[in-house]
Image: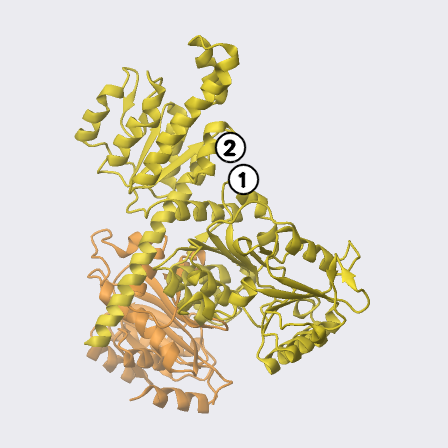
């Protein structure tokens, strides 16, 4: 699969954004680590996806029209059994009135440390990569670092050193320091997307969870598209 | 990055051999006349040709009806005319074969409406003749070594080592006397105005290649050629530091958007990252920007963040220690060798940790000579921060107590000040570590004044000193980061 195969059909369908499922597919193409997940269209499919992935799982509505899911209550987390999955599927499918792509069944990634990684296009500086403290408190902490793409490893690492709460990336309450190579690769790759795919206008990876072992995983992702470019 | 300063479009603008001036007259209140006065006052060495539609002489210079009548082709045109006739003058310059201009006149893009159209017209005319110009809506250039001041205010002070490119003309002209008070001055300063042709990136590039510029100061309200800005800065920083003040980074600038990233990308945070990526030190105020320039242009490269503080008073020492801590600097313990070398100078009342507080010394000369020498040699420290409190009145009193006759007291006190200052200058110039002073005294007090005139940075209060020291070490790290990236990229390229 190529990036074009994801983006062109989406634009053709008139989407302003890729769904979470499509967004993560795009990120994976650039080697960014994402959650293991499957798209299901029925309770049965969801149950079998959960069995394949292994419990515990989360369920999320996947739709290019849903931008901020958690605020709309279309997420169910920490599901431990087939029964949980069926109940959750029914509940969230009824919580939205939008046209949806399906329900994402997703591994639950452990870890309390949440980052945000993103891309914007600035009229003067072009594609710019962002790293910040993510999760629910993203806008409260406003702890971010930006760089103009492309960036190399030295500049990517320097972004993490610019954060006020950079201590969170070190060894923290029994959890390992972040895998800096993996984080740098993610930041470099997001910049690369900005340079190579002009149809992508903005990216949010939030949260990007740091696991207790120090790996980073994109748990939610949003790729916004430019409607002004064919 | 340009090969040499002569390759910059700003070279003939900052170093013209001859000037044609539009807008000067015999009306002393006109801006064009003030500008001609500034050029004449500083003693510009080249030809000056005023153009005036009616007068035969302007400020005692032969005036010409048209630029086309000039006996030579001047290198630079200075235009201070009403907005609507600027393009016409520019066109005449183009026809004459003039390649460079400064358009001082305002009323262009900055006022919107018709002004936007007039600026486009101006650019079109310049492009037609392949001309480069600074402005419009700027105050031009001060290059005191070339005796050139095209601003409408008189130049004050001396040439110095600070190169400035500014999106506000005021931070060129209104800083002449401020800098002079600190023994500082501009190498060359550009006001870039609306940047219709030459912009702040060109200014930075010129200053990067300018041999008289040791440190570059930028005043920025917005960068237009973003990618060129970053690349140009990164090519300069290994050679000389760049300090920038950016304003205009308010929340209001954040873009409304669907993404978190868009909402977080307010201009202040974005520019913070861009400066860091560019290797540029960001100042928080104009005064801080020039403090940092002073430090970086005056002392050897700061190798680390370890500061040793020399004082003879507890409070000022403690405050300096606190200021250093807040600026992210460390205060190392003194090594046994240093303690041993200091022992002959230490009175029983003194404290020999860091800050090193000598209280009331037996011999004042030691405070200005042997002691700072030992502290500069300290292997655990990278910088000496030195407290100055040497009021002239105290020297006079010492003379009186020593029985010096009243008619010789002034001369003897002056001798003492000379001896102390020479000793400090010797250490300042010959040691490979930075020596930085701080004081609460008036900077006109003789000892401090002499040292500042001789180039020693002495800051008013320890906070300003600590912040400047922090910035100088930040430069070392930014420079190392860029050099490491360059060598990594070269390594990747060859593999």
Residue B269: x, y in percent? 45, 60
Residue at 36% in and 83% down: A102
Query: As displayed, is residue B416 above or below residue A133?
Result: above
Residue B364: x, y in percent? 36, 20
Which quadrant would the C terminus of chain B be assigned to in this image?
bottom left
Query: Residue farthest to the front?
Result: B71
Residue A65: x, y in percent? 46, 80
Is residue B372 rendered to the left or right of residue A67?
Answer: left
Q: Nearer the viewer, residue A107 or A180?
A: A180
Which lettered chain is shown in yellow?
A: B
Task: Write down the residue under mark 2.
Answer: B443
Residue at 24% in and 35% down: B377
Q: Are marks 2 and 1 on the same chain?
A: yes
Q: Nearer the viewer, residue B105 or B29?
A: B29
Do we see residue B440 in this rendering? yes
Do we see residue B113 in this rendering? no
Residue B134: x, y in percent? 59, 67
Task: Write down the residue under mark 1.
Answer: B181
Query: As displayed, is residue A197 above or below residue B221?
Result: below
């Amino acid at each position: 699969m190529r990036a074009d195969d994801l983006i062109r059909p989406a634009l053709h369908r008139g989407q302003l954004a890729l769904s979470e499922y499509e967004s993560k597919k795009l990120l994976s193409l650039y080697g960014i680590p994402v959650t293991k997940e499957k798209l299901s269209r029925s309770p049965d499919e969801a149950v079998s996806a959960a069995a394949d992935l292994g419990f515990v799982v989360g369920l999320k509505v996947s739709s290019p029209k849903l931008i901020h899911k958690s605020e709309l209550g279309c997420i169910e987390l920490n599901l431990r059994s087939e029964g949980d999955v069926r109940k959750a599927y029914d509940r969230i499918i009824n919580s939205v009135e939008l046209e949806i792509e399906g329900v994402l069944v997703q591994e639950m990634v452990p870890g309390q440390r949440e980052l945000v990684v993103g891309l914007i296009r600035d009229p003067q500086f072009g594609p710019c990569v962002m790293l910040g403290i993510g999760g629910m408190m993203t806008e409260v902490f406003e702890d971010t670092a930006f760089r103009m793409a492309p960036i190399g490893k030295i500049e990517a690492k320097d972004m993490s050193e610019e954060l006020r709460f950079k201590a969170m990336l070190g060894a923290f309450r029994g959890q390992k320091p972040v895998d800096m190579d993996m984080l740098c690769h993610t930041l470099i790759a997001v910049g690369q997307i900005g340079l190579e795919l002009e149809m992508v206008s903005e990216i949010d990876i939030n949260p990007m969870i740091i696991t207790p072992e120090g790996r980073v995983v994109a748990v939610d992702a949003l790729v916004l598209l430019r409607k002004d470019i064919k | 990055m340009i090969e040499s300063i002569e390759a910059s479009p700003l070279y003939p603008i900052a170093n013209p051999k001859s000037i044609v001036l539009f807008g000067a007259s015999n009306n002393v209140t006109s801006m064009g006349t003030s500008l001609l006065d500034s050029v004449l006052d500083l003693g510009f060495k080249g030809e000056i040709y005023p153009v005036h539609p009616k007068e035969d002489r302007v400020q005692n210079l032969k005036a010409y009806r048209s630029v086309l009548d000039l006996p030579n082709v001047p290198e630079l045109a200075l235009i201070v005319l009403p907005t609507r006739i600027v393009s016409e003058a520019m066109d005449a310059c183009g026809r004459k074969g003039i390649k460079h201009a400064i358009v001082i006149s305002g009323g262009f893009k900055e006022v919107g409406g018709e002004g936007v159209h007039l600026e486009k017209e101006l650019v079109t005319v310049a492009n037609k003749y392949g001309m480069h110009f600074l402005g419009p809506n700027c105050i031009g250039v001060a290059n005191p070594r070339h005796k050139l001041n095209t601003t409408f205010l008189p130049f004050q002070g001396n040439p110095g080592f600070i190169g400035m490119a500014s999106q506000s003309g005021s931070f060129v002209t209104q800083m002449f006397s401020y800098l002079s008070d600190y023994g500082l001055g501009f190498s060359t300063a550009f006001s870039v105005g609306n940047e219709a042709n030459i912009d702040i990136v060109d200014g930075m590039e010129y200053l990067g290649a300018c041999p008289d510029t040791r440190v570059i100061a930028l005043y920025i309200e917005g960068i237009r050629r973003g990618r060129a800005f970053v690349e140009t800065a990164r090519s300069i920083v290994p050679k000389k530091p760049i300090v920038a003040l950016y304003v205009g980074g308010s929340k209001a600038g954040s873009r409304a958007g669907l993404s978190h990233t868009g909402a977080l990308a307010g201009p202040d945070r974005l520019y913070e990252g861009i400066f860091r990526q560019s290797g540029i030190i960001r100042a928080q105020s104009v005064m801080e920007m020039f403090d940092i320039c002073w430090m970086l242009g005056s002392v050897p490269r700061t190798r680390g963040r370890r500061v040793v503080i020399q004082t003879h008073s507890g409070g000022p020492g403690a405050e300096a220690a606190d200021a250093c801590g807040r600026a992210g600097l460390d205060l190392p313990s003194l090594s046994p060798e240093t303690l041993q070398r200091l022992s002959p100078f230490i009175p029983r009342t003194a404290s020999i940790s860091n800050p090193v507080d000598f209280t009331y010394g037996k011999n004042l000369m030691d405070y200005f000579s042997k002691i700072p020498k030992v502290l500069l040699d300290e292997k655990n420290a990278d910088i000496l921060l030195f407290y100055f409190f040497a009021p002239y009145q105290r020297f006079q009193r010492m003379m009186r107590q020593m029985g010096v006759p009243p008619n010789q007291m002034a001369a003897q006190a002056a001798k003492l000040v000379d001896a102390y200052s020479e000793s400090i200058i010797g250490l300042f110039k010959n040691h490979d570590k930075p020596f930085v002073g701080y004081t609460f005294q008036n900077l006109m007090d003789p000892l401090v004044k002499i040292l500042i005139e001789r180039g020693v940075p002495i800051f008013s209060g320890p906070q300003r000193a600590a912040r400047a020291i922090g910035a100088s070490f930040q430069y070392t790290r930014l420079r190392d980061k860029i050099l490491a990236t360059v060598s990594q990229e070269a390594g990747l390229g060859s593999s």
